[in-house]
Image (tube, rainbow, N blue to C red):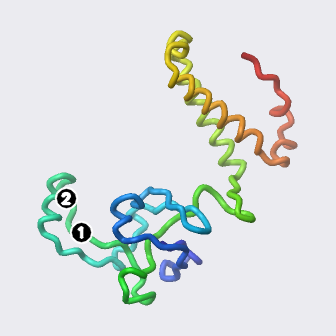
Amino acid sequence: MTTARSTHRSDPTRIGQVRPSHLVTTSGVGAVVDLPAMSVVVRGLDAWSAERQDVILEPRLLEEVRRVVGDSVRTLRSAPWDPQASDDPWTRVGVPVTPFPGTRRGGAVVRSDEQRLHDIVEAAAKVATLVARGRAAVDGDEFLQLALLKLVEVIGEASARISQELATAHPESRNRTWRS
C-alpha cells in the first residue's frame, strides 16, 4: 500500500502492507484498511498504474469474469507494484491509497470544518427523508427510530466539534434552542 510522497507517480511511500489475496476480498477497491499508524481507503482502479501490473494468464477465470461482467474485460492483472522496491511479490509496493477519514494529529483523527458541515447537511437530509414518512411510520418502526436517533447524534457530534474560528465567524449558528 502506498500513498504519494510527491506529485510523481514513480515516487511512492510504503505506509503499510496487505496480503495480495486481501485485495480481491476484504481490502479491495473502496475498502477502509486499518493500518498500525492510520486508516486508508484503497483507491479505484483508475488510480492503479497499468504499466506496473503483471498480466494474469488464467483463461478459465477470464472467461468466467467476461461471462459475469461482459466482454469489455480484456485481461486480468495483478495489483500494481514498484519493480525497484523488491523482486519478492509479497513485499511489493504500489497499491494507491488515500488517508481516511482526515488527517492525524497526535494519534487522533481530525476532520475539517468542511467535512463536519457536510456530515451535518447529509444527516439532516436523511432525517428529512425519514420523517417525511409520517409520525405513524416513525412510531411504529423501532429501526426507523434508531436510525433517526443516530442521525441526530451525528449532527450533534459534528456541530459540537466545529472550530472556534468558524463559530466566531457565524455567531448566528450558536446558542439556538432546539424544539421538539
Q: Secondary structure at mark 2?
A: helix
**Mark 2 or mark 1, earlier in chain:** 2
- Residue at image point 44% right, 70% down: 18
Judge left or right: residue 61 versus residue 30: left
What crowding class fits label 1: few (fewer than 14 Cα within 10 Å), some (14-19), or many (20 or more)?
Answer: some
Amino acid under label 2? Val
Amino acid under label 1? Leu
| Nearest the eye: 117 or 103 | 103
Question: Where residue 150 sits: x, y (%)?
Answer: 61, 32
Query: What residue would you read off at disc 1?
Result: 76
Above or below, 103 relative to 15: above
Q: Quadrant of residue 175?
A: top right
Question: Where residue 172 sits: x, y (%)?
Answer: 84, 32
Query: What residue would you read off at disc 2?
Result: 65
- Residue at image point 86% right, 36% down: 171
Q: Secondary structure at mark 1?
A: strand
Residue 95's disc number: none
Quarter of the image containing the C terminus?
Answer: top right
Outermost residue on the top side: it is 136
Q: Quadrant of residue 169?
A: top right
| Nearest the eye: 179 or 153 | 153
What crowding class fits label 2: few (fewer than 14 Cα within 10 Å), some (14-19), or many (20 or more)?
Answer: some
2 and 1 marks in contact (CB < 8 Å): yes
Judge left or right: residue 1 versus residue 50: right
Q: Quadrant of residue 174?
A: top right
